[in-house]
Image (cartoon, rainbow, N blue to C red):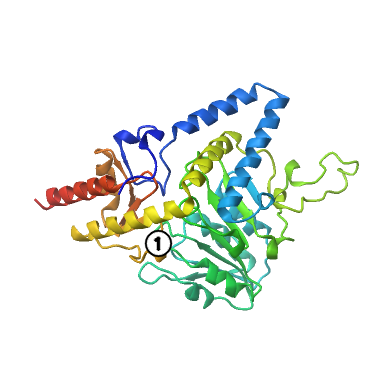
Amino acid sequence: MDALIDRSAFIGLDQRTWFYGGAESPPLHGMQEALHSYVTNRANGPEGRKQNSEVEQACKRNIATMLGGRPENIAFLSNASEAISMIAASFRFQAGDNVVINDLEFPSGVLPWLQLKPAGVEVRVVPSRNWQVTAEDLLASVDENTRMVVTSHVSYMSGARIDYRKLYSELKNTKALLLVDATQSLGVVPVSMNDADFVVSSSYKWLMAGHGAGILAVNPERADRFEPRNIGWRSVEDMFSDTRFERFRFFSDARRFEGGYPSYPTLYAMNYSTNLLLSVGIERIERHILDLGGELIESMKRIGYEPMTPEKPEQRAGNISFVCPDGEAYADELVKHGTYLWGGDGRLRASIHLYNNSEDVARLVGLLAAMAKDRAS
């Protein structure tokens, strides 16, 4: 199976085997060009600010296209963790309320809710079974006091994909809002902001941009009146009004979540990378990663690795995890062979993107088989 893109589009990818996209993606040559454009535009003074705004709006249009929404419902923050924390800190929780999470969540999807416990908010942690959590599992912990359900679309730990659409269809009959972290899925599988109240994502993993941007998509259907407690000059309609020392008015759209300027270098890079992803096609990328992921799972099973990730294509995305007690040591050893993946938490995680091919799979499996043989001898 061939890659969906010429690997020469990436810096140094001809010398490396990159299954590290769940942590961060390989840099694109186009990212360098985009950053150069940003620096060049900075020299244009007021005209440069106008160019920055145009890039920002183009990037929002791309993200909105990926999410099936509208650009005005997309906000750019510093990172996904900030977006989750802002939602947690802004919600008007009361003692006795509860939040439902699960034990496959990354710490950024856990810590902001734990911080609410001293105020009397219960945090209900739904346990996984066989490295999976279903919509039914989460719904079983929802009651009349649940105010927020938080889940990743795709688990950073196991690679399991959660049916958040089904979850949202049930939660719409309750008072509980749904926050979906799409950090491990946006850019490689379809994601809909219309099937959650909030969707967050980082910029430097599957979206193949740089660090410095967090995406917050706000579905106005139920979250239209949700106001942040953080505020800045970009959050309000008229920052220089005659009454600015007496009162303010938030923007009615997602701009109310943006306090100040975003990381424009990151947005220039993300505008380039999202143009690239959309030109290839998210559905096409999904077919590629599912097919190649199946190839990897079968090959790894043949050399004795137990998959943590569901084998059914509809239950996974780009992250493929395998039980490996010495995962961190194996990952460190693979680096010496120019092969990058994530090791730790008792597992190896290979993240498959549009730049991977069957040769990558064969190389990884061959290296792991040889390492196991060396350890056994």
Q: Residue flagged by tag 1: what amino acid is it?
A: Arg
Where is 116 relative to 242, above or below?
A: below
Residue at disc 1, secondary structure: loop
Front residue of 86/253: it is: 253
Q: Is residue 77 visible?
A: no
Q: Residue at x 23, y 57 (%)?
A: 299
Q: Which residue is mark 1?
A: 316
Residue 209 spot, x, y in % from top left:
50, 40
Q: How many marks?
A: 1
Residue 68 spot, x, y in % from top left:
59, 56
Q: Is residue 203 visible?
A: yes
Where is 107 relative to 204, above or below?
A: below
Horizontally, residue 274 falls left or right of residue 194, namely: left
Q: Residue at x 23, y 45 (%)?
A: 363
Front residue of 142/318: it is: 318
Residue 230 spot, x, y in % from top left:
70, 50
Horizontally, residue 326 falls left or right of residue 312, namely: left
The residue lying furthest to the top in this view is 43
Residue 10 spot, x, y in % from top left:
40, 35
Q: Residue at x 13, y 51 (%)?
A: 373
Label 1 crowd (10 A; few <14 / some 14-19 / many >=20): many
The residue lying furthest to the left in this view is 377
For residue 78, which quarter of the picture? top right
Horizontally, residue 197 falls left or right of residue 376, namely: right
Where is 32 relative to 92, above or below?
A: above
